[in-house]
Amino acid sequence: MKSLAAILFSILCVLFFQIPNGILNSTIHSPAFKELTYPGEISFLEEHNTDLTPGDTVSDLDKNIWIVFQDKNGNFWFGSDGQGVFRYDGKVIIRFSTKDGLLGNRIRGIQGDKSGNVFITSLDGINKFDGKKFTTLPVTEKNEWRLDSNDLWFCILGKTGEEGPYRYDGKTLYHLKFPKHHMEDNYYAENGKYPWSPYEPYSIYRDSKGNVWFGTSGFGICRYDGESLSWMYEKHLTLIEGGGSFGIRSIIEDREGKFWFSNSRYRYNIFPFDLNNNPDKLISYTREQGVGKFKSPEGRDMIYFSSVLKDSNEDLWMLTYEQGVWKYDGERIIHYPVKEGSNNLKLVSIYKDREGDLWLGTQETGAYHFNGKTFEKFKPGFTIR
């Protein structure tokens, strides 16, 4: 009969050799590791009583890369729709998932603060990564509307029943609620109450004056100036011609201080005051022609863009779902198709990194980088500038 020591040795050998490839090299035991969190934050390591540094080394990104972000240290983060988040330092790709502390693997946003912390939004909530560990930001359901340049704002695209954004002041994550929209009663009378909400924030944008703008699924645009929230609604901005709802998925202020909301037909001159004697708090504005003398691939005089940014020259780059990317310099519009073979790729987001280079997140084909002439697929070994 085998001795107890021999039996224990055999068990340990079996457990060791069953560890999946890659995991052993990407985890470090730290028995003396002590976690530091903001008051109220819940650490994954604390909750699960583990001392393993998170993440697995992988050879490539997932195909469904929706989000691209570069942190303060120059690392690139790629958020996927189902496989968590990937970090690339120019040499190695590390994948983080729920087993490492993420609340969910379907990523909807990545951003950073001035200290270099990275905040990851998934359908299941918001995490903070400080370079060593993930902490969960517990949600406080309190309508604490404030405007501070250091605050971070979040929305969770696709989460059922959302009626407002999230604001994080470095200590508390507040879940806010929009004030009642003047169209609410008629909207619910016509459409009924679905699991989704017309108040759901699709996009968040901070303008040059510090105001925060929100694009919603059904009620147009809301602006917060630190004192009040005001609304703006035009049917063609939310509803697609010919049927369907687009919502306000992107907002941008151009070099002249004019605003663009999700399509190229018009741009808007926004006044700093609301309409006089208006109990519904409506934004005062005028509109003018956006991109003129333009025809989209299907013959329209405009495009709907789901993501938009300004490049280093302040030219606009408008991303469409299946019609590539369009650059507008104020006079000319240039089309950059994004294809795999003859097929148009399904695009999700566009991002400008710290060097001014442009990146795309796609639904089925990974991440893409602009090389100055065209968008090419990201491959491991890409040199970070």
Image (cartoon, rainbow, N blue to C red):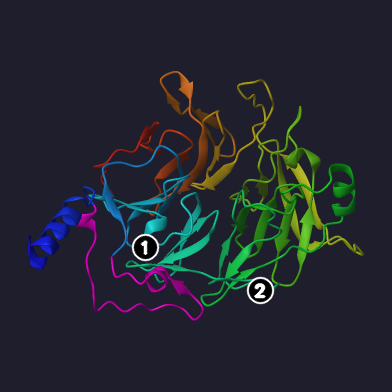
Q: What x and y, as percent, mark residue 79?
A: 44, 49
Q: Would residue 74 be counted in the magenta stretch?
A: no
Q: Give, as a three-letter code, the residue at label 1.
A: Lys
Which residue appears at 74% of the width and 41% of the height?
Answer: 237
Residue 72: which disc? 1
For label 1, the SS is: loop
- Residue at (70% x, 64% y) in the render: 224
Instruction: Name above or below for residue 383 compared with residue 101.
Output: above
Q: Is residue 209 visible?
A: no
Q: Earlier in the sequence, mark 2 or mark 1?
A: 1
Examine the image and state in which quarter residue 292 appears. top right
350 or 18: which is nearer to us?
18
Depth check, front residue: 15 or 103: 15
State the mark number for residue 146: 2
| Main SS class of the magenta portion in the image | loop
Q: Is residue 288 left or right of residue 5?
A: right
Q: Residue farthest to the bottom? A: 39
Instruction: Give the residue drawn at x 90%, y 62%.
Output: 278
Position of residue 72 in the picture relative to residue 154 (left or right): left
Region in magenta: 23-52
The percent coordinates of residue 42 (x first, y second) are 47, 73
The percent position of residue 147, horizontal first and vertical second, equals 64, 72
Amino acid type at circle 2 is Arg
Location of residue 320 by image quarter: top right
Mark 2 crowdedness (10 Å alpha carbons): few <14, some 14-19, many ≥20: some
Give the number of the disc on residue 182.
none
Residue at 59%, 55% (x, y): give it: 156
Placement of the N terminus among the 4 image quadrants: bottom left
Q: Secondary structure at mark 2?
A: loop
